[in-house]
Structure formats: C-alpha cells, structure tokens
Image (cartoon, helix red, strand yellow):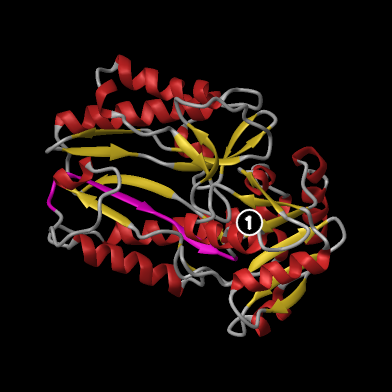
C-alpha cells in the first residue's frame, strides 16, 4: 500500500519538474510511509521523508529511530547526527538531486530560509521548488481500508456521544462534560480525541468553535456537542445539538431549519457536483428561512488522517465532488448572545449519492 502511494507520488515528479520531494507534514508523512509519530509543535519535527525517483529515505533523530524502523514500509531510516538541515543537505548531495520540491503550504519560513542558505553553498546548486497540496490531493479519495478505519472511528465516537447525551443533566459543567467525552474516547480504545471536544451551552452555543467553560447546563437551552475520535490514525467528527427539557419556540424553529437544510444537502450531493453547489443547497434553505446572516462557516470539510482535509465544501473555490470522498455535512445557525444549533454527519460519497457513516440513514427519513 505504501509503496503504491510513493510510486503514485513519483509519477507526478515530471509534471512538477522535480527529481526529489521533501515531505514534512505529519499526516502526509504517515500516509506515505506508515510512520505514526506526531510533531509536538510546528517548530519540532519527528522526521522528514526524502523521496527521489529511485530512493525513499526517512530522516529522523535518535528519539524516533527505533519506532521508525518498526513502522515504516519501503523507506530507509536515516538517523541524523547533527540538525535536520545538515542531514537533508548531505542526503540530497548523495542522491544527486537538482530540483527539490517541498510543501510550500506547511514548511515554516525560518526552516525554509535555513535550508535555502545551506543548499546555496552546495555544488552543484539544488533548486527549491514550492508545491501545494500534492499529497493532500492524493488523500482526497479514500481507499477501502481507509473507509473502514473511518467507519470504526465514527462508530466509536457515536457510541461515546450517545452515552454522554443520556447522562446530561441541568447543573453539569461544560468543562466536566468535555473531560467525560475525552475520558470515554480513551476508554473505548481510541488513540485520542481528534480535536478538543466542543461543549457549548446557552449563549456559548452561538460560538461555532467555543471552548468549554465553567458554565452550568440549564434546561430548555441549546447544548452543542462537537466531538471526534482518532482511531488507528483516522478521525471522526460529529455534532449534536440537544436540549434538556422543552426548547423555546424560537429554537424549535431554528433546529428544524438546520435539520431540513442538512437533510436537503445529504439527499442531493452526488459525484460530479461542485462543492459550492452542495454548500448552496443548505445555505439557500437557511437563507429562505430568514437566518442567512447567521450561517457563517462552510457546509463541510474532508476528513481522514486529519480532522480537516480536502475538499472544503463551502461557498468558495469550487471543486468537483468525487466518488470515494469522505466529508462532513454540518449546517448551523448562530444567534449572538442567544445561542445556536449545529448538526454534523460524516458521509462517504458513493456513485448514487451520500452514505452516512455517523448515523443510520433511517434517522434522516431518506
């Protein structure tokens, strides 16, 4: 599997005019090699991939050598003696590379400058070629094994969320609920939460990416739970909005509008449709209901090794939806100072339309 992916990447070299590529983005690194180590932060790397037409190297340091040797497939593991820049320079010289592609959308400026300075001192000169989204584009259509991993992640997360929702009571604290979610995710065997759980109640639910606070849950108000698990490296992402007791008439209407917009999009998306059209199906429904100014984010996003991937299913940058893509459908309405509603499902796009991964189709009366 990994060798096929690397060969597919090599097949793109000629079109980009390169004879080597340098991969530093963690999910891309794992997708191509199987190396699971994360990067602690943007300025720290657990390893880099250096791929030419004939060679594939994973350059790391002594902290990760043993792990890399156990995990990677089809790559020679090189333990750097000095810093990464020196190790990369040495490897490129030995490989005879002349034009090095790199991930322009991810490499930080300081590291780029260091590499550029070091390579400018070599003879023959190695030219740096910025590339954007090359491996990400390869990850857009999911392989059968990836789809199954996503299904397992979604099932685990769904079970956890169902349990948490049943436990909710007035007086529970947002932060405590978020911690309960993270604890259950781990207890059920996930690697970790795919992202920090969002638990937002009352006015806080009007913040699409709210951070859980010490606010206590109250009856009749909206409670947004946006959660995801990472299992075998693959992420899930789902959102429910629930009420403890009877919601107000305003929120009954808002909830119904969001649900109808979501169902309309779920029924309509199909291969060949542009992402902007899919977004407009839900957005137009919300607009006609009078809430157009209160839906500010995209309808959805791709999901896989990262919680947010290509394609972006939104009002900008149209991209054709393709069979095998996995993405979310998550319309929302957010009234500042009052509260909000968001509903989110994961789907895989089949030839006949969207198949729900996070919820049984019967729940949506398809």
Q: Residue furthest right?
A: 54
Location of residue 354 in the rendering, given as x and y in whole percent from the top left corner:
59, 34
81 relative position to 172: left or right:
right
Q: What residue is disc 1 on?
A: 28
Residue at left offset 66%, top offset 61%: 119
Instruction: Check residue 349 for magenta coloring.
Output: no
Left or right: residue 312 versus residue 252 is right
Task: Indicate the secondary structure of the residue bearing disc 1.
Answer: helix
**Label 1 packing within 10 angstroms: few (<14), some (14-19), many (20+):** many
The quadrant of the rendering that contains the N terminus is bottom right
User: In the rendered image, which quarter is residue 174 located in?
Assistant: bottom left
User: Which residue of the protein is positioned furthest toward the top in this rendering?
Assistant: 288
Write down the region rendered in magenta.
218-232
Residue 284: image x %, image y %? 38, 17
How many numbered marks, from 0 up?
A: 1
Q: Is residue 106 above or below residue 163?
A: above
Q: Nearer the viewer, residue 213 or 66?
A: 66
Q: Viewed as shown, does residue 185 lie left or right of 288?
A: right
Do we see residue 1 in this rendering? Answer: no
- Quadrant housing residue 67: bottom right
Residue 271 at x, y percent in the picture: 65, 27
Which is more toward the observer, 182 or 40? 40
Work out whether residue 320 can be spotted.
Answer: yes
What residue appears at the point 49 percent right and 70 percent down from the top-left corner?
44
In the displayed structure image, the side of residue 267 where residue 295 appears, left or right: left
Measured along the vertical axis of the image, is residue 301 above or below residue 280? Answer: below
């Amino acid at each position: 599997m990994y060798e096929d992916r690397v060969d597919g990447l090599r097949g793109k070299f000629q079109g980009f005019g390169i004879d080597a590529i340098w991969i530093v983005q963690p999910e891309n690194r794992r997708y191509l090699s199987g190396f699971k180590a994360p990067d602690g932060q943007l300025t720290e790397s657990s390893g880099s991939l250096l791929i030419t037409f004939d060679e594939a190297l994973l350059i790391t340091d002594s902290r990760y050598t043993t792990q890399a040797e156990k995990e990677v497939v089809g790559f020679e593991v090189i333990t750097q003696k000095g810093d990464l820049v020196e190790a990369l320079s040495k490897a490129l010289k030995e490989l005879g590379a002349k034009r090095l592609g790199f991930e322009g959308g991810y490499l930080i400026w300081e590291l780029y400058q260091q590499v550029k300075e070091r390579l400018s001192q070599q003879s023959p000169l190695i030219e740096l070629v910025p590339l954007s989204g090359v491996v990400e584009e390869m990850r857009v259509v999911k392989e059968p094994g990836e789809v199954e991993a996503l299904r397992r992640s979604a099932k685990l997360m769904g079970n956890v969320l169902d349990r948490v929702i049943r436990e909710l009571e007035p007086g529970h604290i947002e932060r405590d609920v978020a911690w309960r979610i993270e604890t259950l995710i781990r207890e059920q065997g996930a690697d970790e939460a795919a992202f920090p759980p969002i638990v937002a109640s009352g006015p806080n639910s009007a913040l699409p990416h709210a951070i859980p606070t010490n606010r206590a849950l109250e009856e009749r108000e909206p409670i947004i739970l946006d959660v995801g698990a990472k299992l075998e490296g693959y992420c899930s992402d789902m959102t429910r909005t629930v009420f403890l007791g009877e919601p107000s008439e305003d929120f009954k209407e808002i909830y119904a509008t969001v649900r109808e917009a979501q169902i309309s999009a779920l029924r309509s998306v199909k291969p060949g449709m542009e992402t902007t059209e899919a977004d407009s199906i839900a957005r137009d429904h919300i607009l006609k209901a009078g809430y157009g100014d209160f839906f500010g984010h995209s309808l959805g996003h791709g999901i896989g090794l990262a919680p947010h991937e290509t394609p972006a299913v939104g009002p900008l940058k149209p991209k054709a939806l393709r069979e095998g893509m996995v993405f979310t459908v998550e319309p929302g309405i957010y009234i500042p100072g009052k509260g909000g509603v968001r509903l989110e499902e994961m789907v895989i796009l089949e030839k006949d339309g969207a198949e729900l991964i996070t919820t049984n189709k019967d729940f949506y009366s398809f």
